Image: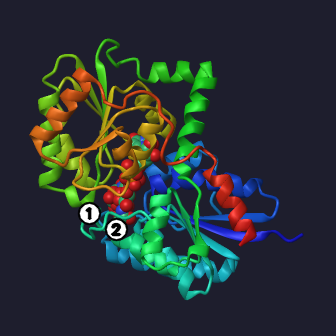
Amino acid sequence: MTRKKVLLVFGTRPEAIKMAPVVRALQQHDAIHPIVAVTAQHREMLDQVLSLFEIRPDHDLDVMRPGQSLDSLFATVLCRIGGILQQEAPAMLLVHGDTTTTAASALAGFHNRIPVGHVEAGLRTGDLRAPWPEEGNRRLVAPFADIHFCPTSRAAGNLLAEGIDPGRIHVTGNTVIDAVLDANARIAASPALQAALARQFDWLAPSSRLVLVTGHRRESFGHGLRQVCKALLALAERQDVQIVYPVHLNPAVRGPVTALLGTHPRIHLLPPQEYLPFIELMRRASLVITDSGGIQEEAPALGKPVLVTRDTTERTEALEQGTVKLVGTEVERIVGSANEVLDRGFPAGGLQSSPYGDGTAARRIAALVADF
Ligand code: UD1
Ligand code: UDP
C-alpha cells in the first residue's frame, strides 16, 4: 500500500512543541508518510525542541533574520513553502495555530491546491488587536483549511459561527497536553533525569516559593512589558519568593527585561529553557505568571495556578475552571493577584483534569488525516 504523503510545516517553539506529538503519531500510522518542513522562524528556540523530540526536518528554510518585518517573513515563507509543496506534492499540508509561518503556509497550500489541515483551529478572542497579529492569522487560515482540528468544543463553535462546514470540524483536544503529559511522565519515570534537573537547578533556594514567569506578546511591547516588570519588582520585595524568568530571545523583550530586572537578587533571568527543564520549573512553581498561550494550557494540566498578563484570552475554558485568571498589565492588579494566590492559595488549586485534552489528541488527528 502506498502511504499518504503528509507535509507538516512549523517554525516557532510553541508550534514545534505542539506538532511534535503529531509528527510522532503520523510516523506510527501505517497509512501515512510524514514529511517535516521547518521554516525556522525561530532558530535556537526551535532547535531546542527538534533535538528533544528527535525530529530531523526534511526541509529547513532557515528564514530567521534579525529585525525582519512581518511582511518580509510572510512573503519569504509563502514563496519558499510554495516551492516545497510543488516539489513534494503532498496529499495534505498540516499547519498549526496562528503564527506568520502558519498563515503564510496555509495560503501557499491554497495557491498550490493542496488540502490544508489546521491543528489548534478555532481559537478566537474576537479582538483583532489582541493577540496581535495572531488573531488575524487564525482568521486567515480558517477559510483556506479543508479540515479543522479543534482543541475544544468551544473552538469548534467559533468555526461553526463563521460558517465553516460542520463536516470538516473535529474536536480532538490540544496536542500540547500530549506534549506536557509526555514531558511530565519522562521526568517522573527517570531518577537519572530527576538528578540531572536537580543539579541544573541546585541554585534555587529550597525554602522560597517559586514564581515562574514568561512574556513575549507583541501587543504588550513597550508600556505593557514595563508594567509587568515593575509588578515583578514589587512582588520580589517578598523575602519568601524567588522569581524565575526564562527570557524570550526577541530583542524587544530581552532588552527591557534585562535592563529592568537584571540585577535583583530574587529575580533570576535565564535563557530560554529546553522543554524538560522548563516543565521541571513548572512542576516546582507555586505560581505561573505569563502571557503565553501554550503555558495557559500546560500549567492547569499540572495543577498550577496561572495569572495571565493580558486583557483578553482565547483560552477561556481554564478561566471558568478557576485555574487561570486574567490580570492585564496593571502593576497593582498583578501584584495583588499574585499575593492572593501565594497567601491564600487558588480557589481551584490542585491537580485537575485539563479542559484542553487528555493526551490523545495527536493520535486522533493522525486517524482523521488517514481517513481524509
Ligand atoms: C512568534 C509568533 C508568536 C508566537 C511566538 C512564540 C508571529 C508573528 N509571532 O513571535 O505568535 O507566540 O513566536 O514564541 O508569528 N529570536 C531569536 N532566536 C529564536 C527566536 C527568536 O533570536 O530562536 C529573535 C529574532 O530576532 C527574531 C525575533 O526574536 O527576529 C522575533 O521572532 P518572531 O518569530 O518574528 O516573533 P516572536 O515575537 O517570537
Ligand atoms: N517553553 C519552553 N522553554 C521556555 C519557555 C517556554 O520550553 O523557556 C515552552 C512552554 O512550555 C510552552 C511553549 O514553550 O510549551 C510556549 O511558547 P511561547 O510562550 O514562546 O509561545 P506561545 O505559547 O505564546 O505561542
Which residue corresponds to the image point at 24% horizontal and 68% vertical from the top-left?
129
Give the amino acid at mark 1.
Ala
Which residue corresponds to the image point at 45% horizontal and 58% vertical from the top-left?
12
Q: Nearer the viewer, residue 159 or 305?
A: 159
Looking at the image, do the residues carrying marks 1 and 2 touch, with CB atoms under 8 Å apart?
yes
Label 2 residue SS: helix
Asked whether residue 95 appears in the rendered view, the answer is yes
Residue 114, quarter of picture: bottom right
Give the amino acid at mark 2.
Glu
Give the percent coordinates (x, y) of residue 184: 55, 32
Give the percent coordinates (x, y) of residue 363: 68, 53
Give the percent coordinates (x, y) of residue 141: 46, 75
Task: Quickly name the residue at label 2.
Answer: 135
Q: Earlier in the sequence, mark 1 or mark 2?
A: 1
Task: Quickly name the residue at label 1.
Answer: 130
Which residue corresponds to the image point at 34% horizontal and 45% vertical from the top-left?
319
Which quarter of the frame holds ligand 1? Answer: bottom left
The quarter of the picture where the C terminus appears is bottom right
